Image (cartoon, helix red, strand yellow):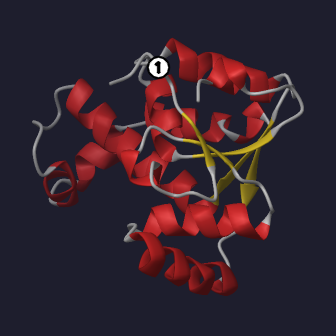
Amino acid sequence: MRFDELPAGSQIFVDANIFIYHFSGVSEECSSFLERCEREEIVGFTTTNILLETMHRLMMLEAVTRGLVTPGNIAKKLKGKPEIITSLATYAEQVKKIPAMNINIVPLTQDLCYQALTWQQQYGLMTNDSILLAACQEYKCWNLASNDRAFAGVKEITLWQPADVE
């Protein structure tokens, strides 16, 4: 479903790619969606691990965008050059803006990790994706904003996707 169809007052979990598309300027729809969260028109949630994934991906994106490393095995290249990591700052500023968008950060607990195993086994999802579904289950919030096609077959959720990103 499209973001503009999400009714006001809805609660929704937000995946890392939505934040990435917003901060990188790739998707106006993601930016508008997050503005709705910021205005408290809708209630946004994400998990600690999604916040970390967003931070990691934005850090790598900044390094490539600034020409400090070339695409391909970016994490490995950065690991070998800590001086590059210490020179990066934009990604950190961006990640710190997420709570200011009225996105509630759900803590990662041991129980949530164990609940995620069920989702992994049922749908063959990667760890961060299954933890996100475990959080949806824990908070009884079955709306999920993501452009990850891995969620398309999960019948328990309503998947909300940007239409302006392939």
Location of the C terminus by quadrant is: top left
- Could you say where residue 95 lies in the image, as x and y percent from the top left? 57, 40
- Front-lying residue, 59 or 155: 155
Q: Is residue 139 above or below residue 149?
A: below
Crowd rating for badge 1 (residues with CA inside 10 Å; few <14, some 14–19, many 20+): some
Q: Is residue 139 above or below residue 111?
A: above
- Could you say where residue 156 lies in the image, as x and y percent from the top left? 63, 59
Residue at (47, 19) in percent of width and height: 163
Residue at (77, 29) in percent of width and height: 37
Is residue 154 toward the left or the right of residue 32 in the image? Answer: left
Residue at (56, 52) in percent of width and height: 51
- Could you say where residue 161 lies in the image, as x and y percent from the top left? 52, 31
Inspect the image, locate mark 1, and give the three-letter code of the amino acid beneath it.
Answer: Ala
- Could you say where residue 8 lies in the image, as x and y percent from the top left? 86, 26
Residue at (51, 41) in percent of width and height: 146
Q: Mark 1 = which residue? A: 163
Mark 1 element type: loop
Location of the N terminus by quadrant is: top right
Numbered-mark total = 1
Q: Is residue 18 above or below residue 33?
A: below
Is residue 104 toward the left or the right of residue 108 in the image? Answer: right
- Front-lying residue, 71 or 133: 133
